[in-house]
Every structure is written in C-alpha cells, then in structure tokens.
Image (cartoon, helix red, strand yellow):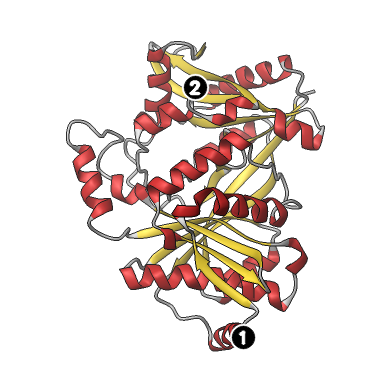
Amino acid sequence: MGEVNIRLVTSRRDHKAFVQLPHAVFAQDAAWIAPLSFERLQHISPRHNPFFEHGRAQLFLAIRNGQTVGRISAQVDDLRLARYQDATGMFGFLDGLDDPHIFSALFKAAEGWLAAEGMTRAVGPFSFSINEETGLLVKGFEHPPAVMMGHAAPYYQTHVEAAGYQKIRDVLAYDFDNSKEFPRGLAGMLAKVHATGDLEVRPLSKKNLDRDLAILIDIFNDAWSENWGFTPFSTAEIHKLGQDLKMLVEEEFIAFASYRGEPAAMAVTLPDINRATRGLRGRLLPFGWAKLLMRLKFSPPEAVRLPLMGVRKKFHGTPVGSALAMSVIDSIRTYHVNRGTQRAELSWILEDNLAMRRMIEAIGGTAYKTYRIFERNLA
C-alpha cells in the first residue's frame, strides 16, 4: 500500500490539508458533520487561539503515495504543568484512515516531539486542552457530534490501543428531552427553596458582560477545581469566551443562581450550530453564509449543548447545592422549551462524577455517548 511518511505542518497549504483531512476519513459516515473550515483554521493558529499564550504545539500530517491519510497534534500546556508538575504532554486532532501503520507513524512522531520537550507521559486526545474538545468517541457513533464535540470511527480505539495507550478516564454525553417536566418530587423541592427567598435566578446581562463573565469563571474555577484534569482558563481565554458568548447566545442561554445574595451556581448553553451547518461541508462560500444566517437568525436552534455547569464547592452534596443546580438548569430549560428547542446535550460528564450523573438521570437525561481519554508512559 505504500510507505507512510510524516510531514510537519508548516505552510498555509499544510494547515489547510490538516483541516480538510477529516473530509476524506468520514466521507461515507452519515453521522459526521463537517466543522466550519475557517473556524478550525483559526483554532490551530497561534495568532488566533489564546491557548498558544501558555502552550505550544506541533501539528503532523501522515502522507502515503502523495495523499494525506492522517493527522495528529502534540502539545504542551504550561498551565497544566504548573498545576500538576507531572511532565505530561498531550496529543489531539487524531484522525486517519483505517490502517494501523498510519496511527503508529502518527503516534511515533507526536511522542518524539513530546519527549524532546521533556515530557515522560502522553495523554489525550485533547484539541488542544481539556477546556476544548476532549476524549475519543468509543460509543455512540451513530449520533452526530454536537458543537465542540469530536467524532470518530470504531477502528480508532483499536489502533490507539495497539499503539500502547490505555484508558485513564471516560467522559459521558447525555441526551436530554427539554419538553419533559421535572419529576414531581424534584419540582416540589425546587419550589420550596424558591419560596424561602434565599435563592434567586437571573440570566446573563450582556450590558454587564465583564462582571458576569468574572462571576462565571469564579464559580467554574471553584466548582471544578477538584475534578480530574482540571486546568483553569487563562485571562486571554476568558476574554475570548466572552466574545464568543456575546456573538453566539441570547442572555437567557446562561443562568446564574445566588443563595442568600452570593452567586453560587451557573449554567451555560450554546446553540448546536453543527445542526445548522450540516450540509455546508464546512464551507461558507459562496452561499453557505446566507444559509447559516437564515438558520440561526430566524428560527430557534434544533438543539443546544450545555458545556458548563457548576455549583460552588461548599454546597456540594447538600440539598441547597442540588437546588442551585436544578434552578439554573430549569431556568435555561424553560427558556428553550418556550422557544421551541426540544433537545439538549449535557456534556461532558466525568464517569466518576456520580452526584452529577444521578442528578441528570433523575431529570430524564440518558447517557448516549462515551468519550475516552488515554495515556501512555513515554519512557
């Protein structure tokens, strides 16, 4: 079949080939939705992605008989290293045709770069960090990926494990029917807490975006601080998050809950623009931009994704904590239902975050996708 050669991504042409490679891999996969090419090009650009202010990366292409047949990234995140002091690098953007030689060559190149950077362990896939696309899809291949979630074919797992990688964690995506009412007991508990006047819920204020963004990140950093793999957002990443939220969402897509005057919980939903871009093949020209504008501007999203939800740590495992979580979810759910959006994806959820999983399942969520994070010692 020909030798597999690895090429460093250096030129504009290489970057385009890196972004376009999944089109060849998933050409016959009815579930795959092409991400917008211009957004992916910006994501891998040090000039546009604030990850590169605290991290560095090298992109690789696998070439056989003159054709691009695979891709991978290797990256080091100084924020992560400062927190864990474990000489661990990461890989991501893993895609390739169904051939173990392709995956083996890609991993050899990525691991060599990480070792040269002083890393003794590799984990992934992350594209580029745990706060972006996380994990390899190992269950739920028949379902299209939601916004900012990856896709894969079943053979990926086989080739990753053949390269010496083992599971370190699974993260789950839950499907949720927005139209379902909360169970009577949970609804009653929520009403009782609201009746005390101790708990208040409000939407994001774009007029006070900087204030609310600071509250959101403060709650996130506190709520998630003990989660596996937690890495805080940098200042630049927070600023970019604010810009993206201002452009993508209405104020009611985000909810804050306060307990006795203290901001204590938040939840963020995003329109699942993957559904809006389906059929555009990742291209906005010549007419894709008009189709996307029509789909986003003149009708509610078919579905939303909830990527961020958190309750301050001191309320974890308490009835107040449960009420806070339920309040922000119910506020967002009610808004989307009233607009006609019926489905939501809640992702990702660590497999061992049993308290969150039980709460989601209690309100009708169903785990329908599993993403796996792998590790390998490079020594």
Residue 194 occupies quadrant: bottom right
Instruction: Say what secondary structure mark 1 lies in.
Output: helix
- In this orientation, does residue 265 appear? yes
Mark found first going from the N terminus, 2 or 1: 2
Residue 172 occupies quadrant: bottom right
The mark found on residue 47 in the picture is 2
Residue at (66%, 16%) from the top-left corner? 113
Closer to us: 328 or 364? 328
Q: Amino acid at mark 2?
A: Arg
Toward the left, the furthest residue is 287
From the top left corner, tell me how far across and down residue 363 is, in percent.
54, 75
Residue at (48%, 18%) from the top-left corner? 61
- Graded by Cα atoms within 10 Å as few (under 14), some (14 to 19) or many (20 or more), the crowding at tag 2 reads few
From the top left corner, tell me how far across and down residue 17 is, in percent.
39, 20
From the top left corner, tell me how far across and down residue 134 is, in percent.
57, 42
Residue at (81%, 32%) from the top-left corner? 86
Residue at (78%, 37%) from the top-left corner? 83
Q: Which residue is mark 1?
A: 189
Tell me whether the residue at label 2 lies in contact with that at label 1, contact meaning CB atoms closer than 8 angstroms: no
Closer to us: 229 or 374? 229
Instruction: Say what secondary structure mark 2 lies in.
Output: loop
Residue 216 occupies quadrant: bottom right
Toward the right, the furthest residue is 85
Q: Amino acid at mark 1?
A: Met
Looking at the rendering, in which quadrant would you find the N terminus?
A: top left
Q: Compared to 97, does 223 lie above or below?
A: below
